[in-house]
Image: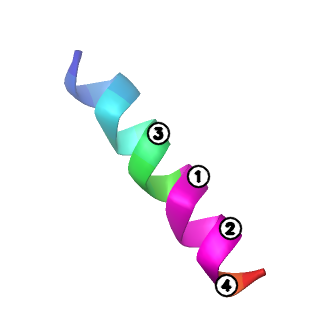
Amino acid sequence: MVQEGFGVVLYVYYWKIK
């Protein structure tokens, strides 16, 4: 699913900002 992959990207992006 594309949405699932997008969610993972957002999760990693948030983790990087943190």
Alpha carbons under labels 3 and 4: distance apart: 15 Å
Q: Nearer the viewer, mark 3 or mark 4?
A: 4
- Side of 10 where 17 appears, left or right: right
The image's mark for residue 7 is 3
Q: Read off the residue under disc 2.
A: 15
Q: Nearer the viewer, mark 2 or mark 3?
A: 2
In the image, farthest residue toward the top: 1
Alpha carbons under labels 2 and 1: distance apart: 6 Å
Residue 16, compared with residue 9, is above or below; it is below
Residue 5 locus on image (x, y percent): 31, 34
Alpha carbons under labels 2 and 3: distance apart: 12 Å
Kind of residue at disc 4 = Ile
- Side of 15 where 9 appears, left or right: left
Q: Read off the residue under disc 4.
A: 17
Kind of residue at disc 2 = Trp
* Residue at 50%, 56% in the rendered image: 10
How many marks can you see? 4
Q: Read off the residue under disc 1.
A: 11
Q: Are marks 2 and 1 in contact (CB under 8 Å)?
A: yes
The image's mark for residue 2 is none
Alpha carbons under labels 4 and 2: distance apart: 5 Å
Quick one: label 2 or label 3, which is nearer the N terminus? 3
